[in-house]
Image (spheres, helix red, strand yellow):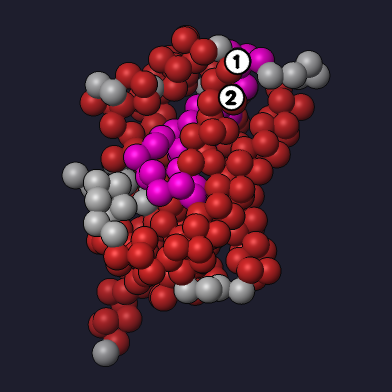
């Protein structure tokens, strides 16, 4: 199964990963649950979480009035959500980086159900090719998003440089996907009734960086 599809297994029956299932059961508290999920996915070595889907769904729910966070209207709520979600994503990355710096080599060699050597290897390769930009592009790639900050810590990337690129990546990732959900929800209010189709759009969106990297690699190989 494609790595890009794994965070969205709710499409195949895992109800607890369905944003509407979560909204029905937790209401406004879904937002706080989402902050925790985003934090964990972005740095605590647990990539099997629906980060992209939640960002899109939160934007959509705010636009359609199904999730009321603050008085002042949907744009105020959107701004508050963007700030909080970006903070959670950035702090998750900082945690992953510090884990990598503190216990990097043993963690890198560890084989287990969640922390698998192959994930580190793929992320190492991605990080080596893209350098600092990997902290931005990696945000949009499932699995890489979780491991790239740990790899940055293991490689002892300069902390200030890491903070700058990681924050930029957090802003772009959260803003692009959440605002996509918000403006599509505002334009097509009925979109929420078929969120499974909307998630397919998110899957396509998250494939773009992977497709770009594949195209670049193939083009470079053709020149050799």
78 with respect to 24 (left or right): right
87 with respect to 153 (left or right): right
Q: How far apart, in angstroms, are the residues tagged by discs 1 and 2?
A: 6 Å
Is residue 54 one of those drawn in magenta? yes
The answer, for residue 88, to whether it is visible in the render is yes
Which residues fall within the magenta stretch? Answer: 41-68
Q: Position of residue 204 (x, y in %)?
A: 37, 44
Q: Are marks 1 and 2 in contact (CB under 8 Å)?
A: yes
Q: Position of residue 57 (x, y in %)?
A: 50, 27
Q: Position of residue 138 (x, y in %)?
A: 46, 58
Q: Position of residue 153 (x, y in %)?
A: 51, 66
Is residue 73 one of those drawn in magenta? no
The local secondary structure at tag 2 comes to helix
Q: Residue at x 45, y 63 (%)?
A: 103
Q: Residue at x 41, y 35 (%)?
A: 50
Q: Residues within 10 Å of mark 1 (few under 14, many from 20)?
A: some
Query: Which quadrant, please, contains the N terminus?
Result: top left
Q: Residue furthest top?
A: 24
The answer, for residue 208, to whether it is visible in the render is no
Q: In which quarter of the view is residue 124 placed?
A: bottom left
Which is nearer the eye, 104 or 178? 104
Which is nearer the eye, 194 or 173? 173
Relative to 34, say whether 42 is above or below.
below
Q: In which quarter of the view is residue 159 placed?
A: bottom right
Residue position for label 2: 31
Relative to 178, say whether 124 is above or below.
below
Relative to 162, say whether 175 is above or below.
above
Q: Residue at x 26, y 90 (%)?
A: 224
Mark carried by residue 28? 1
Mark carried by residue 138? none
């Amino acid at each position: 199964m494609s790595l890009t599809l794994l965070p969205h297994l709710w499409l195949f029956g895992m109800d607890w990963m369905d944003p509407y299932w979560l909204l029905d059961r937790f209401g406004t508290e879904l937002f706080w649950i989402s902050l925790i999920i985003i934090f964990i996915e972005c740095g605590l070595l647990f990539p099997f979480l629906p980060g992209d889907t939640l960002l899109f769904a939160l934007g959509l729910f705010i636009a359609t009035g199904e999730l009321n966070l603050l008085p002042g209207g949907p744009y105020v709520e959107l701004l508050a959500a963007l700030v909080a979600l970006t903070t959670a994503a950035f702090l998750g990355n900082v945690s992953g980086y510090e884990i990598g710096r503190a216990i990097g080599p043993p963690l890198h060699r560890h084989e287990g159900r969640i922390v698998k050597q192959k994930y580190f290897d793929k992320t190492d390769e991605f990080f080596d090719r893209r350098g600092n930009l990997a902290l931005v592009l990696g945000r949009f790639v499932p699995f890489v998003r979780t491991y790239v900050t740990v790899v940055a810590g293991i490689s002892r990337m300069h902390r200030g440089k890491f903070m700058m690129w990681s924050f930029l990546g957090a802003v772009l990732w959260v803003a692009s996907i959440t605002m996509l959900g918000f403006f599509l929800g505002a334009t097509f209010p009925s979109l929420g009734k078929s969120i499974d189709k909307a998630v397919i759009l998110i899957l396509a969106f998250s494939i773009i960086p992977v497709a770009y990297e594949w195209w670049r690699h193939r083009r470079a190989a053709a020149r050799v």
